[in-house]
Amino acid sequence: MSMKHIGYYALVLSCLIASCEDEMRDTEVPTVRIISPAADTKLWLEVTAAAEVIDDQSVSRVEFYLNDDLLGEDTEAPYELKFNSKKYEDGKYTLKTVAYDGANNQSSATREIEIFNTLLEVNVGESYLSDDLEKWLVIANTQGKVTDYAMMENGKNINFKRSEGMESEEFHTMIIDRYLFSSQSEYININEYHGVLPSIWTLSSSGKGDSLGTAKITYTYGNEYRMNISSHNISESNWNNNYYVEFDSMISRATLTIEKKPASVFVNVVKRNDNNEPPQYVFIKDLAIGSEHTLSQKEFISMKVGQTTILPENKSLSINVYGVSDEEIEYQLYYNFLNKEATNLITYIPENGFKDYSYRLGLSLDQYHSYKFDKGLPSSTYTMPQFNLEITDISLESFSTTIEGEADFSTIVWKYNEYDELGHRDMHRYVYTNVDEGKVEVKFTEIPTEILKKYPLLQNHHNDVTYTHSSINNYEGISSLSDYLNLIYSPNYKTPYYENITIYPDNSNARLSKVKLPKHLQEEKIRRGETW
């Protein structure tokens, strides 16, 4: 074969090989799908991103991006990558995966996610704390282990971030209030909230702000009357400041501090031990700075009879009637309490000055109390909440109950009180928790050592608190404890309508019919000589 022919056949073979390589070249892009995390989910701490990739030949690598930031890559299935979300600010991000095959063909997939490592953001008003109050916020995981805490300061916001190990979305928070009235008199109140979701609280300025001025009110009435005064100021955030003072002297003087405009005052008098005479009142809508009001008996207007309510048999009843003024402020108009022998209740409504009413109705049978807060006026027929509660365990570390009846959340209360000739020392601990399928199980949150050492009352007597009562709460438009907290710590807070039952386990009738204590507590009461 001549060299010419050899060259010809070599050229033909080369063309055939090139044609075959063209036919075998990989032009198919891989298919990629994000399988974790789910779309539009809130993520915290360590996040695992995972992708599913399919290719007709092979997959060389998968890259993971958060927005345009390369997080890393994985070269072997299953294709996943872990990253610490705490390196990024809270907010919405685009998670992107890019898959490459052996021929460097690529395809991508995206998913919107939200990083949310903030547990609690607290906005403290410029004058929220009074001079005699110190207030702490404590954050703990769902086992009650403290992860962070801070002391509140006026005008200073607090931002608690999620700590390592707090994998659950829920957490516990505790508010410790310490009031010092004198060197020998103090009060510590602990509100402990379990199963809270991340949220923002606004603690609006109230009480002691920069006052615009003062107004004085003087009024004279007979000793047989009890006098009440409630003043209201509206701040820019519509937070209602309520000062309620009761005077028992014949001539009463009140100096009211006006912090925001407009300011108004409601004064009423009621005859002692006489439910037949209607209360009388004066309502001043615009309380001017520097004004002095001397109210005579002739200026007081009698309230009118509102309604007669028939009481259930063997029940005592209490009622608070509230009026809403044109400024959307609620005033307590009249409080009435009748004993078991009474058969009906007369409520009183002012002739003018108020456009709407609400009431808080309470029924009592010994130590078993039911409450209902509702719109409108009390009627002669109503339905009170019905619950059964059985305490299955109680100690200084834990508390368990079972509950029959609908409830949004439950409150358990412990108290310690000490009085002597020098003063008084009081400590209350309230634990609020969700009701999960009729059960409440509480393990108390620990108190940071720094706070225990700072307050001797808390350090020396935090084990001396004794269980006093439990409450079961059902609120309108609320389905969880977090909903309740977001409502009461809102700048536009208004009293929600609710049903509530409070159970005191120190009365035989209430205890036997509605509350059951563990056997060891029954025996302890017997040893102490208490009636069971």
Image: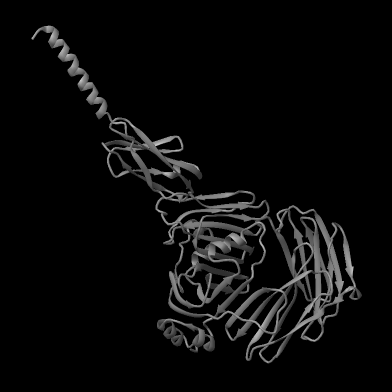
Q: Quadrant of residue 273?
A: bottom right
Residue 44 against residue 9 in the figure, above or below: below
The residue most toward the left is 1
Residue 331 percent coordinates (x, y): 75, 69
Does 49 sit above or below residue 349?
A: above
Q: Is residue 161 left or right of residue 51?
A: right
Front in this rendered view, residue 19 or 159? 19
Colouring scheme applied when the structure was drawn: one colour
Q: Position of residue 443 (x, y in %)?
A: 43, 67
Q: Residue at x 48, y 70 (%)?
A: 435
Q: Residue at 52% x, 64% y: name it.
A: 192
- Residue 180: tell me if it is visible: yes
Answer with the quarter of the image where residue 491 lies. Answer: bottom right
Rendered location of residue 106, percent (x, y): 35, 33
Depth check, front residue: 354 or 369: 354
- Residue drawn at x 66%, y 66% is 495
Query: Residue 69 at what x, y percent from top left?
Result: 43, 35
Extreme top residue here? Answer: 3
Q: Quadrant of the N terminus?
A: top left
Horizontal arrangement in the rendering, residue 370 relative to residue 460 (left or right): right
Q: From this viewpoint, is residue 182 visible?
A: no
Say if 33 sits above or below 353 in the image: above
- Compared with 448, 27 (above or below) is above
